[in-house]
Amino acid sequence: MEGIELDCIMVHVLEAGLTFLEANNPKNRPSVKGFNIIDGQLAESSDGATFESRNPALLSDVLGAFPLSTKDDVSAALDAAHAAFPSWSATPAPTRGQIIGNMGRLLMEHKDDLVRLQAREIGKTLKECGGEIQEAIDTCLFFQSEGRRLYGQTVNSELPDKELFTYRRPLGVCGIINACNFPSAVPFWKMIPAIMCGNTCVWKSPQDSPLLSFALARIMHQAGLPDGVINLVHGKGSGAGQHIINAVDEGRVNKISFTGSTAVGKMIGEVCGRNLVSCSLELGGKNPLVIMPSANLENAVEGAYWAGFGTAGQRCTSLGNLIIHKDIYDEFVAKLMDKVHSTRIGDSLEHEGVLYGSMLSEKYAKDFLEVIQICEEDGATKLYGQGRITSDNKPSGFVGTAEEGVFMWPHVYAGVTEDMRCFHEEMFGPAITLVKADDFDHALHLANASPYGLSSAIYTNERLEAYRFKTGIKAGMTGINNSTTGAEAHLPFGGVKGSGNGTRESGIWVIEAYSYWHAVNDELSGKLQLAQMDVDEIEMVEAEVRWDELV
């Protein structure tokens, strides 16, 4: 596609001092030697170990080699974050906001380059990558102004000549760990409010998107961010990520923000809990979408189709259980399957109009193929889907050479009931399970029956059904006549039950996750006054009411 060489230009624009590796990459795409960024300086791993970043839509395309960070590397990043904290937390919040605004403007300037870079590194479509970079921009512009609204309160005292105040204070050093399916929006969701509140960060980049993470970190520094405020380390979750978690036990991390699996989130919650350290956990989902007879079926089909197969189903908010009222079940499924059969799949850097691209990596592909076996074992009826796409096994809508990347068929399983394991398991790939509901109450019960509670949706034109659904559903987010996916940068994002611990990303609500309240009692009287003890009692005066005169 025209403009692919912008990946190379991006490296020069960011003035990172990178070197290009000798690689026989296809289409003359550059391959670079990447670095950690610790205290504003480029750094290799302490033992020299590296790992490769490969394009999952074109496996022969190596984006670069990056440090496989050690415990010493993470320790150095933590040292830098601690050293930078006093100065950064003392920087006026409006000044911090201005730097964040600069980040947003730099993201806008380099948006096209970043979009192509992200599409190349994780295989998402250009359109989706464009939306994600825009969300990072929106986050910066939103929090730029929040730097002037980091409000506290003045509170009336119960005693004379005394003033009471509340202020927001930063927590300290934040460990940031995010998944690779949203490698630009999610770290900005986390780090922008964190630094706006005056915290410093150690960011462990997703293993499958280190080059994009490096580019984003460079943009942050070019915006005027002081050295040490955000430190980037690359590596595996079981390596660099685990070292950050272990540092909580060592008293070196004051906050963990994690996006990923529920199992890992529970482990992080245990570590933080025993140390009384705050953690934000944004975890998995098995998101229900209910279709009622009054719905506009064409609109509902579009919403269900996108929710299930956009991003190749690799969203925590992707559709899990599609719950359809029995009266319209057959008609709805027929319309949905017409769209599924025509799904266009391929590398959007090479082909236009694809709904979704590759899996995020070979590992995600392997995990997906294993989890859909649960549907087979449970006895669900497979309506469509044949695993991994190959030249000898491909749907009619696939474009390209299958063996060049990691592509999956769309999968649809019918006859699913709540006693099946596949009703409860997150698939994290292009697969949806169809569930039949007898009536509204049964549909709401089914929507609440999974262990997750992230996103949810209902299609109905009966206002009472919409009301009862939004008040009865146990989820952090609900769409009415909209899909389970999608959120705006100024709305709270997060879930309940197995989907999170109640904290939220985005909007003004996220400030609670990266600051604590500091109450100040300013005594002006020149003497000791004790609340609750020195307060003058107010005597009540009895007054006789002559009720007979009022009648």
Image (cartoon, rainbow, N blue to C red):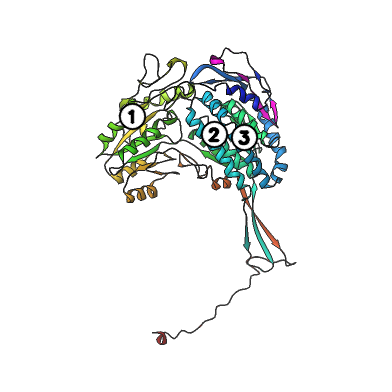
Q: At numbered mark 1, what does the secondary structure look like: helix, strand or loop?
A: helix
Mark drawn on residue 106: 3
Magenta-span inclusion, residue 33: yes
Residue picked out by circle 2: 133
* Residue at the outermost front position: 2
Q: Does 523 appear in magenta?
A: no
Asked if residue 329 shows in the view, the reply is yes
Amino acid type, mark 1: Lys
Question: Disc 1 or 2, which lies upstream in sequence?
Answer: 2
Q: Using the numbered discs, state the Cα–Cα distance from disc 1 to disc 2 in whole angstroms.
A: 28 Å
**Disc number lying in front (2 or 3):** 3
Name the residue that disc number 1 marks: 339
Mark 3: secondary structure: helix
Q: How far is the residue under mark 3 from the one under mark 1?
A: 39 Å
Mark 3 or mark 1: name the one nearer the start of the chain. 3
236 above or below 282? above
**Dot 2 or dot 3, earlier in sequence:** 3
Under tag 2, what secondary structure? helix
Cβ atoms under marks 2 and 3 closer than 8 Å:
no
Give left or right: position of 113 versus 385: right
Range of the magenta residues?
Answer: 22-42
Q: Position of residue 52 (x, y in %)?
A: 58, 19
Q: Is residue 454 left or right of residue 512?
A: left
